[in-house]
Image (cartoon, rainbow, N blue to C red):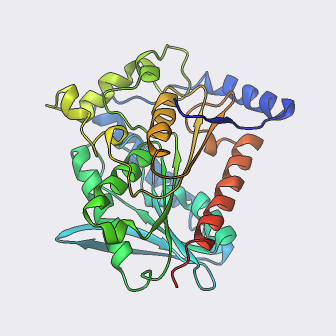
Amino acid sequence: MANHTLWPAGEVELAQMQRFNKKLAWLPRFRIRNRVTPRVIQALLRVSQKARGNTLLKHGLQAETRRVGVDGVTVPVRIIRPKGKAKGVVLDIHGGGWVIGNAQMDDDLNVAMVKACDVAVVSVDYRLAVNTPVEGLMEDCLAAARWLLSDGEFADLPVIVVGESAGGHLAAATLLALKQWPGLLERMSGALLYYGVYDLTGTPSVRAAGPETLLLDGPGMVEALRMLTPGLSDEARRQPPLSPLYGDFTGLPPALMFVGELDPLVDDTLYLAERWMKSAPVEVYLLPSSAHGFIHFPTALASGVLAYSREWITAQISCNRVA
């Protein structure tokens, strides 16, 4: 398994995370059992976003929504540009278990990247798996990536792909699919992946997950992955890029990966890092006392990870500026 680094955390930070975990333990676990519940959650998400209003205005930023694509495949994207000239571009792929979420849900994280890293952020509003096979979501993200890497506005800028959870899966799958266009793949300057799903048959930590898992329904994850890929055998589910873990990582850019030690998906990140680092530099960090989704928690550990991520993005962009 990859030589990972345990994220440095003091006693105060650990105690804060552990207190937050006690609150998580009272919450229902996210699970995929049917098509109805995700639709309800998605509707509630949109209502809450409308109630919040435009969170970008207080930062003096605006979002442009447009439909982009290549070869007849089009997908909506949400573009947030910095006030000055962009030094790079982040391709953001949101999480949500493939069945909920939208490009707007990452606005807070994306605004922080825009301001700290002087980047434009293009967030993909891919279709969801309540109505579309997972392969369709992958097709959407690939179309957005190919458009971004070919578009005149961003043609001279380094590109970083950022993905969280299901978005981590889609980000890794997108990079592997880009191997069909080596010239485009060469323009990718890095991949920032938070606790993704990289084996759709379930890694050992997923299969061994007990009822005490936080946020995610660990014991039900294998069946949920099967539900997302109906009609496929486990052998078919392991084929890349559907399961990025089994892909060929030659030519892929440097990567930064994070996963919590309490996450059922811990093996996904550590196994992926082990294979990826044979072809490119990889930093991988294990977060102590941390569950799935930790970058959204109001904790010092989360703040530290996000700050380090933004520093890494800035560094990758600085050393990969296109002449």
The residue drawn where x is 36% and y is 81% is 151
In the rendered image, residue 140, in percent from the top left (x then y), is placed at 28, 59
The residue drawn where x is 66% and y is 34% is 287
In the rendered image, residue 163, in percent from the top left (x then y), is placed at 47, 51
In this rendered view, identify the residue nearer to me: 278 or 178. 278
Is residue 36 placed above or below 69 in the rendered structure? above
In this rendered view, identify the residue nearer to me: 92 or 47. 92
Could you tell me if residue 299 is visible in this image?
no
Residue 219 as seen in the image, left or right of residue 286: left
In the rendered image, residue 32, in percent from the top left (x then y), is placed at 35, 30
The residue drawn where x is 50% and y is 45% is 277
**Disc count in the image?**
0
Q: Based on the displayed image, in which of its 4 quarters is residue 225 positioned? A: top left
Q: Based on the displayed image, in which of its 4 quarters is residue 113 positioned? A: bottom right
In the rendered image, residue 73, in percent from the top left (x then y), is placed at 20, 66
Is residue 249 placed above or below 37 in the rendered structure? below
Is residue 69 placed above or below 86 in the rendered structure? above
In this rendered view, identify the residue nearer to me: 182 or 50. 182
Is residue 86 placed above or below 130 in the rendered structure? below
Q: Based on the displayed image, in which of its 4 quarters is residue 112 positioned? A: bottom right
Could you tell me if residue 72 is visible in this image?
yes
